[in-house]
Image (cartoon, helix red, strand yellow):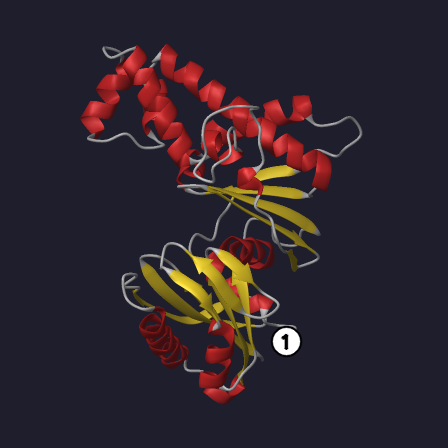
Amino acid sequence: MEYYIGVDIGGTNLKAGIVNSYGEIIGEADIPTGAERPQEIVLQDIFKVVREAIKNSGVNQNDIKAAGLGSPGMIDSKNGIVIRNYNLGWKDFEIAKLMSKEFNIPVTLENDADAAALGEVISGSAKGADSAMIITLGTGVGSGFVINEKIFRGCEWGHMVIVKDGKKCTCGRNGCFESYCSATGLINMTKEKISEFPNGILAETAKSEGKITGRTVFDAADKGDENAKILIDEYLNYLACGLVNLINGLQPEVVSIGGGIAKQGEKLLSPLREKVKAEVFGGIKMPKIVTCTLGYKAGLIGAAMAARNL
């Protein structure tokens, strides 16, 4: 049996897992990131959490063949460099080389969304698929594409425009997929609807929950709020638009959706499938549209499995 290290570098926590060649985590550990600290100091904690994961797995370190790191931000995978990680303040960080020197094994560096996408293909919602597109609806819109269990790098689909001259995006452009379909986008749309109807069920729901989240509008719709139902339909139209653009171009076998909004399950997926089906270009096979199943484990498994060919 061969074993690999997978590391997920998050803004809140650093996670490490020891993964076998079947894509199974057999030992893991995590530690707070301490994102305000210099990158060289955080790196020492990455080493620490990896050693703890090795200890928890019971695997002899000499049996570990390679390691994979998953990091948000701008990544140079070929040279193993984090060009910019805005969440951590990293810049031009040759992390793969330093990790390789510390553990005397080859190390690959991947974007965290790409790593998570590979994890879902290896062990999760898209297991066995020849091609899979993973979309994460969180603070932003994360994206990844995997073909024959290999990452297709460079997928920043959250910043394709779906509304010409639309809402301002954090990237500086207008009308990005992320501006409309991230959890942040849905929250902003919910706030706008509450401003329009301050005495409705949607406003009451937000007040009772204490804050507006991506779930608020779905909860209000469950209570019969027609304005919430209209907003959900509007949101799904935007989401379907973005997905259809990608499906027409990439023709994936599976589309797997993750992030907090995906927790709505069939309340989200059932109408979304119908909207996508109505818009997909004629002759293109409708992909299977599902929700991600691995949670944080997707990043660990994907990062580790990306290292198999080193």
From the viewer's perspective, is residue 82 above or below residue 202? below
Q: Is residue 184 above or below residue 120?
A: above
Kind of residue at disc 1: Leu
Q: Residue at x 40, y 35 (%)?
A: 183
Residue 205 picture quarter: top left
109 lies above or below 125: below
Image coords of residue 150 (percent x, y): 66, 60
Residue 256 in view of the camera: yes
Q: State left or right for residue 258 relative to residue 52.
A: right
Percent x, y for residue 155?
Answer: 60, 48
Q: Could you say whether the residue bearing mark 1 is in a helix, strand or loop? A: loop
Q: Is residue 24 visible?
A: no
Q: How many numbered discs sit on the rendered protein? A: 1
Residue 20 at x, y = what percent?
A: 54, 73
Residue occupying image coordinates x 57% and y 67% = 305
> Relative to the observer, which residue lies in front, 155 or 18?
155
Q: Quick one: label 1, few (<14), some, or many (20+) residues within 10 Å?
A: few
**Residue underneath mark 1:** 310
The C terminus - image quarter: bottom right
Relative to the observer, which residue lies in front, 196 or 73? Answer: 73
Quadrant position of the N terminus in the picture: bottom right
Task: Give the quadrant of residue 220.
Answer: top left
State the image coordinates of residue 57 (x, y, percent, origin top left): 41, 77
Q: Residue at x 28, y 66 (%)?
A: 37
